[in-house]
Image: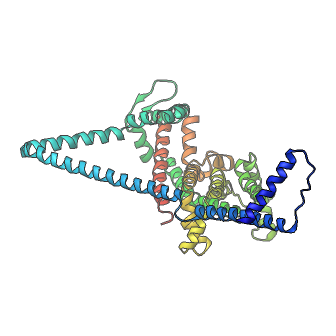
Amino acid sequence: MSDNKKMSDMLNKIQDDVDDGLDYDTSMDDEDFDIFSAESRKSEDTVEDTEKDVITEAEGPDTLLSDAFALHKQNEIETAKKAIEEEKQKERDNVDERFRYAKTKTDAELEEEFERGRKNAQLVAKKKNSVRYRMKRSKASYVMMAPYFMLFLLFTVLPVIMSMALSFTYFNMLEMPKFNGWTNYIKLFLHDDIFIISLKNTLIFAVITGPISYILCLLFAWIINEFRPKVRTFLTLIFYAPSICGNAYMVWSLILSSDRYGYLNGLLMKLGFIDEQKLWMQDAKLILPCLIVVQLWLSLGTGFLSFIAGLQTVDKSLYEAAAIDGVKNRWQELWYVTLPAMKPQLMFGAVMQITQSFAVADISIQLAGNPSVNYAGATVVTHLLDYGSTRFDMGYASAIATVLFLLMVGTNKLVQKLLRRVGE
């Protein structure tokens, strides 16, 4: 205490001398300096202790923020409990009220009210499932779809309906159609031998070229998809080019030429397989096999491109999940992962292959002629073109078109049923 007083007196004396304008020596002796240093260290220690206390208080577990959070959480829990209790109480009140109401009614009245409520529920469900309700709910989507729908209706649906209607008439393009009932269909199946031959050839085409070309499209697309993007693009162009090549029939005409200068005849004679040239497109036994080979060569078309696109959109994480589930090889990946993930593309490719296999006409006309030898290359479409474009018997041609349309629709339904089982 005496040291503090001594230091204070010394500082007051210096201040007084400064105020008086005196030139005072402000140097301290050793004793004074020790006293001043000790007091300074005490002040610094006090400040450090205060800071440590503040930090410790702020970092402690029982802070004000944590208390506020816990209190807020507790309030939320209590509020939720109150809301649940209120809902339960409302349910109990409703049950009691229904019991009291039921006691005032007879069994017949209660049965009548129940039946009325059931009918109202059925009416509401029927309304929600109606086309008008769905169209009203999705009005914007139908408005955007309207231009395409009108074109599809005008150029696809309407001609099919008109063709079905004309199939029950005699119509020669010069006179008004005359209704003749089932005459065209009776003539078609019972008196038209050429139609039976063409129908048999078409079914053979469809059974052989349809599944084989479909599998080839999928197999080549699956293989090509494993390459790098630039190589994949080049290979896709190579495989797709024949289906869009305008000179494809001219090339095959040179290959299947019946003289010894035909490429196939020359090659087989040079290798010693045959001694004289084959009449590929004039022999009734060889026409259909040759046409099937050409059709398979041209089959990698739009369906093939859709498979390439579908394979590129498969989510890669599905393969990782399948590996965890026990899929061990690439064939299992193809059946359980790849094909189920690209069912829309599979369906589109199936429709395209069905259409191509049943609508074969240009190949037969360009290579075998129309009519071909003993009608060996005749198909339903070539028979349809004969009556529709040459004889102008549009009623009979419409009957042929209707039979072909129903045949395509039935085959399409069968293929859809089979594709639903992919991945099972």
Residue 127 position, x and y percent, is: 32, 37
Q: Work out whether residue 285 can be spotted.
A: no
**Residue drawn at x 51%, y 59% as measured from the top left:** 66
Camera-side residue: 270 or 52? 52
Residue 118 position, x and y percent, is: 21, 44
Residue 113 position, x and y percent, is: 15, 41
**Residue drawn at x 44%, y 27% as measured from the top left:** 177
Camera-side residue: 399 or 132? 132
Determine the residue located farthest toward the right in the rendered image. Answer: 23
So how many labels did they put on this image? Answer: 0
Q: Work out whether residue 272 can be spotted.
A: yes
Camera-side residue: 240 or 405? 240
**Residue drawn at x 47%, y 62% as measured from the top left:** 421
Determine the residue located farthest toward the top in the rendered image. Answer: 175
Q: How is the image coloured?
A: rainbow
Camera-side residue: 163 or 414? 414
Residue 420 position, x and y percent, is: 47, 59
Quadrant the N terminus occupies: bottom right
Left or right: 78, with 396 as reference point: left
